[in-house]
Image (tube, grey):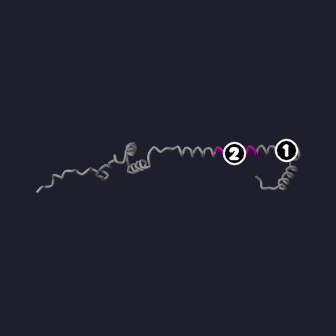
Amino acid sequence: MFSGGFTEIGFILFIAFLLFGPKKLPEIARILGKGMGELRRASNELKMSLEEEIRNLDRKDEEVSYPYSERETHHYTEMEEEGFEHPEEARELSHQSESDLTPAPEYGYDYSEPSQQEPESRSRG
């Protein structure tokens, strides 16, 4: 704890002996010892509680299950950016599979299937 050798500690004790006298020195040493012990216990308790909290956080991170895939979350974010007026609608659509989603014609997409018949407007002949 201290980097002082035996001579430095002896010198400090000699000065304390001169300042406080032989009757007060044991009381002061006892008080200092108790104070240092309490300080050490408090620091150990704090250290252990912090380590326990860190372990609990690590355990919770491992236990977390993500209810939505990254793709669904990304899709929901895109719909929010496009300006859906009703967040519930965007949320419901984000949970549908990608094949179920057909963009609205107002966005410029046309996914209608081409007809198998030839248009009647063509003239034959």
Instruction: State the residue at coordinates (57%, 46%).
Output: 58
Q: Which residues are magenta?
A: 36-49
- The residue lying toward the viewer, choosing from 70 and 42, is 70
What residue is pinned by disc 2?
Answer: 44
Instruction: State the residue at coordinates (55%, 44%).
Output: 60
Residue 84 within the magenta-colored segment of the rendering: no
Image mark count:
2
Q: Residue furthest left?
A: 125
Q: Position of residue 23 (x, y in %)?
A: 88, 44
Category of crowding for the residue at label 2, using alpha-carbon neighbours closer than 10 angstroms: few (below 14), some (14–19), many (at least 20) = few
Three-letter amino acid code at disc 2? Answer: Asn
Dominant secondary-structure state across the stretch colored magenta: helix
**Left or right position of 41 against 116:** right
What residue is pinned by disc 1?
Answer: 26
**Left or right position of 24 against 101:** right
- The residue lying toward the viewer, choosing from 34 and 59, is 59
**Left or right position of 73 against 9:** left
**What distance separates the C-alpha of mark 2 from that of mark 1?**
27 Å
Q: Nearer the viewer, mark 2 or mark 1?
A: 2
Q: Secondary structure at mark 2?
A: helix
**Left or right position of 4 against 41:** right
Q: Position of residue 117 (x, y in %)?
A: 19, 51
Three-letter amino acid code at disc 1? Answer: Pro
Instruction: State the residue at coordinates (77%, 43%).
Output: 34
Query: Who comes first in sequence, dot 2 or dot 1?
Result: 1
- CB within 8 Å, label 2 to label 1: no
Q: Secondary structure at mark 1?
A: helix
Q: Position of residue 113 (x, y in %)?
A: 26, 50
The quarter holding residue 56 reads: top right
Q: Residue furthest bottom?
A: 125
Q: Quadrant of the C terminus?
A: bottom left
Instruction: State the residue at coordinates (85%, 54%).
Output: 11
